[in-house]
Image: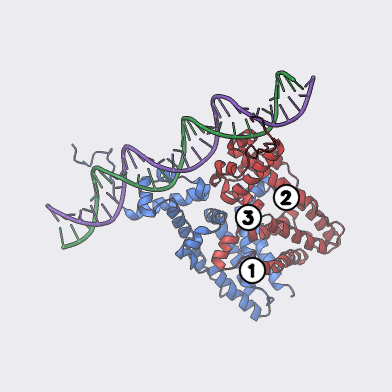
Chain colours: A blue, B red, C purple, D green
DNA sequence: CAATGTATGTACTAGTTAGTTAGTTATACG
DNA sequence: CGTATAACTAACTAACTAGTACATACATTG
């Protein structure tokens, strides 16, 4: 009786899977931190939303802060992996810029949790990113692609040659990040949801126009 | 002896000043909330940084959330009052856009706490702004000024006529907000401080160029 | 198949935190 | 001058919250 029988549903089949436990905690934590911030998220609540217990958070991540840093690292490496797939080398510079801005636009739209984590991390003065070895040395595929596009465009005499890739990247990010990160206050004040599906194409084109107009302007 | 004498420094002249107490609490709270977020800020710490006690926070603001909302309201009304002073009606449209972008740029740079509060409020899905009657009906002087500039520019045949004032306002805000709000993660990743004084003029001109290039482009 | 380390659950704790209770004192006003 | 009221203080509390001690079960490997 004390022995576990296959027909005892009370004692669930407690299969052990360290990787599953770890990744489940991480997934739940990412959502919770993105939703409520570092201070607002609750370790007990994160634990409750997993199939395991709070003890496991401390076992795998050391504590609340370790868990938050791991969530950040995972979010960043995930986004960077996506960016790595950007292939615009074969396109002509103008079309490459259009594709790159559209891709960035799409990335930001489809990863709101990532954007929120970045906002939260900025509220914390990027203290955790600075501390993380993984995040400090992370390459930026989108910037690399942009740098090469600008070089080609400049060589072809299509783009002005006094522009800095980081500045152009900043323009694109600013627009895409603002649209997602400031969605709620913007809507409250201007009564417009920047993520309204009906406005999507308009904004997706606009950021391409904006950047290209700037790049092709006379110096 | 029990009577308070002018030469007894132990019993400080506890002058009562409701307005001073209230505004001191509000000033400290604004800094604390901007620094640590709503959940991260501590009522006890806010109280400790004032000359009064925690009880007064509850006396004047009802609670932590009431205090946070009051801080938000004050920050927004302060910024709006500043914007009201924008006077670009007498300038020609191109110059007016240059002035307006530069002014917005300056405002954002000199009010980092306001930008941080906005970021924090977005993390909270603008729940508090939506609830505040003061903030819901706040006019937007910068947008009004922009609308009139665009009309004049369009009438003069200088600007394209398919642009929406809210969209242009969004571009300008996106750039200026991003530069301040995402300063820390941007620096950690791209090793560039967007608020470096040496880059200030460069960025201040850039946002004007960017918007004007867009407004004067062929449709 | 024993045994050893990894993985997991339960129950607890110390410290914190928002909010409150029960008053006291200054000041305006008749 | 006395008194009503607004402004203010100190000490307290109940609930929460991150983190831990301790016990135990699974599974891998020799």
Q: Position of residue B121 (x, y in %)?
A: 61, 47
Circle 3: is it few (<14), some (14-19), or many (20+) Cα within 10 Å? many
Outermost residue, front direction?
A: B1
Say which residue label 2 marks: B79
Q: Residue at x 68, y 80 (%)?
A: A157
Find numbered disc 3 in the image and state the secondary structure of the residue it sits on: helix
Label at residue A179: 3
Q: Is residue A195 visible?
A: no
Q: Residue at x 50, y 68 (%)?
A: A84
Question: Is residue A147 or residue A53 the one in the foreground?
Answer: A53
Mark nearer the viewer, 3 or 2: 2
Label at residue B59: none
Q: Position of residue A8 (x, y in %)?
A: 24, 38
Q: What subunit carries mark 2?
A: B
The earlier-in-sequence mark between 3 and 1 is 1
Question: Is residue A207 or residue B11 the one in the foreground?
Answer: B11
Q: Residue at x 59, y 39 (%)?
A: B65
Circle 2: is it few (<14), some (14-19), or many (20+) Cα within 10 Å? some
Disc 2 from disc 1: Cα separation = 29 Å
Disc 3 from disc 1: Cα separation = 17 Å
Say which residue label 1 marks: A168
Q: Is residue B52 visible?
A: yes
Q: Does A78 sit left or right of B115 as displayed?
A: left
Q: What subunit carries mark 1?
A: A
Q: Position of residue B154 (x, y in %)?
A: 82, 60
Question: Is residue A219 or residue B120 the one in the foreground?
Answer: B120
- Check the picture and name the quadrant holding the C terminus of chain B: bottom right
Disc 3 from disc 2: Cα separation = 21 Å
């Amino acid at each position: 009786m004390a022995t576990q029988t296959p027909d005892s549903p009370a004692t669930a089949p407690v299969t052990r899977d360290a990787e599953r436990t770890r990744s489940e905690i991480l997934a739940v934590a990412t959502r919770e931190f993105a939703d409520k911030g570092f201070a607002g998220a609750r370790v007990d609540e994160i634990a409750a939303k997993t199939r395991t217990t709070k003890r496991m958070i401390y076992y795998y991540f050391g504590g609340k802060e370790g868990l938050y840093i791991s969530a950040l690292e995972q979010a960043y490496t995930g986004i960077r992996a996506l960016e790595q797939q950007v292939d615009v080398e074969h396109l002509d510079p103008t079309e490459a810029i259009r594709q790159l801005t559209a891709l960035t636009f799409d990335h930001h739209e489809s990863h709101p949790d990532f954007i929120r984590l970045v906002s939260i991390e900025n509220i914390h003065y990027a203290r955790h990113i600075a501390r993380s070895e993984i995040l400090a040395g992370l390459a930026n595929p989108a910037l690399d692609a942009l740098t090469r596009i600008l070089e080609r465009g400049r060589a072809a005499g299509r783009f002005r040659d006094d522009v800095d890739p980081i500045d152009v990247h900043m323009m694109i990010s600013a627009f895409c990040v603002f649209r997602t990160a400031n969605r709620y206050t913007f809507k409250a004040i201007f009564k417009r949801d920047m993520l309204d599906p009906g406005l999507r194409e308009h904004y997706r084109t606009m950021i391409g126009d904006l950047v290209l107009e700037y790049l092709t302007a006379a110096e």
